[in-house]
Image: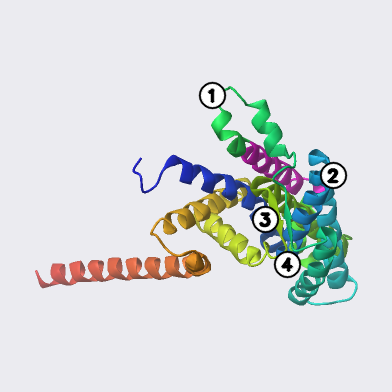
Amino acid sequence: MSTFITWAIIQGALEQGLIYALVALALFLSYSMLNVCDLSTDGCYTLGCATGAVVAIAGYPVLAIFAAMGAGVCSGLVNAFLQTKMKVESMLAGIIVNTGLYTINITIMGKSVISMNDTETLFTRTKQLFADTALAGGYKLILALAFAVAVLFLLIFFLDTRLGLSIRATGDNAAMVKSSSINPAFTTTVGLCIGGAMTALAGCLIGEYQKSCDINMGTGMVTVALASLIIGETIFGKFPIKVRAAGVIAGSCLYRVIVAIALRFNLPASALKLVSAVIVAVAISMPAIKQIIDFRRTKAQAMARRKKELEGGMR
C-alpha cells in the first residue's frame, strides 16, 4: 500500500467507523423503522460520553458502558414523552431535548473538557489482554468490531420479535397499528429509548477510545450518522432488513475512510468541517444522483433502440 494511504490510516478510520456505526444503527431504528425524525442525537451522544467518562474515572470502566446506556434511555424517554404525551412534533421535540442536554452534560462533566489519559478503560484492558500476541496492534479494532457486531445481532433479533415487528408496523402505518390493539405511543417510546441507548453507547466508547470528553464533541453527529445511514441504504436498500442493518455499519466505515482519504491532501485542520459537509451533502444526494444516472441510462438505451429501428425501416 502506498505511503499516501497506509494501513494505520485505514485501521483508524475503521475503528472510528465501527463506533460511529452504533449511532447510525440508532437512526436506522428511529428514522427508517419507526419513521421518526430524532434530532436529539448530538446531545445524547455527548451525554453517553460524559456519563461514561465520569464513571470510568471513578474506577468502573465496564459499569461506564451500562451507565451511559441508561442515560441514553432516559434521554429517549424524555424525547418520547414530548412526542407521545405532549404532542410535540418529533423534530421540535428532538431540538428541545438536545438543547436541554447541553446543560445536563456540562453539569455531569463539571467542566467543558475531561481528560482520561490516566484512566483505565475497556480499550486499555483489551490492550493488556492481547499484549504479546499477533493481535496486539489491532486491539482497538477488535473491541470496536465486537461491540458493532453484538449490537447489530441484538438489533436484528429484536426487530424480529413481536415488539420489534410492532415498532416496524408503527413506522409503516400508525393508524393500522392502533386499530390492531397496539399502542403506538408505547412502541414509539421503546424505539426511541433503544435508539438513545445505542447513541449513548457510541459516545461512551468514543470517549474511552480517544481518552477525552468534550462538551461540543456531539456537534453535527446527527448529520454524519444520517450520511452513513444513507450510504448504507443506497448500497443495500433493496436487500432484506438484516442485510440493510449490516449495510449501515458498512456505510459508516466507508464514510470514515472517505474522510481519512480526503484529509491526506494536506488540507488545513480548519477544512475538516468543510470536507465533512461536502461528503455528507454528496451522501445525502446519492439517491437523487443515482436516479438521474438511471434516467439518463434508460433514455440513452431508448434512443439507441429507436435509432436502430429507424435504420432497419430505411432498409
> Badge 2 local density, few (<14 within 10 Å), some, or many (20+)?
few
Dividing the picture into quadrants, the one containing residue 314 is bottom left
| Inter-mark Cα distance, 3 to 2 | 26 Å
- Nearer to us of marks 2 and 1 is 2
User: Which quarter of the figure is the C terminus placed in?
Assistant: bottom left
Q: Nearer the viewer, residue 96 or 167?
A: 96
**Residue identified by numbered label 2:** 58
How far apart, in angstroms, are the residues tagged by discs 4 and 3?
A: 11 Å
Mark 3 or mark 1: whose residue is earlier in sequence: 3
Amino acid marked by disc 3: Val
Q: Which residue is mark 1?
A: 134
Q: Amino acid at mark 2?
A: Ala
Which label is found at residue 38?
4
Q: Position of residue 37 (x, y in %)?
A: 71, 69
Residue carrying label 3: 23
Q: Is residue 12 visible?
A: yes
User: Residue shown at 28%/69% (left/top)?
Assistant: 300
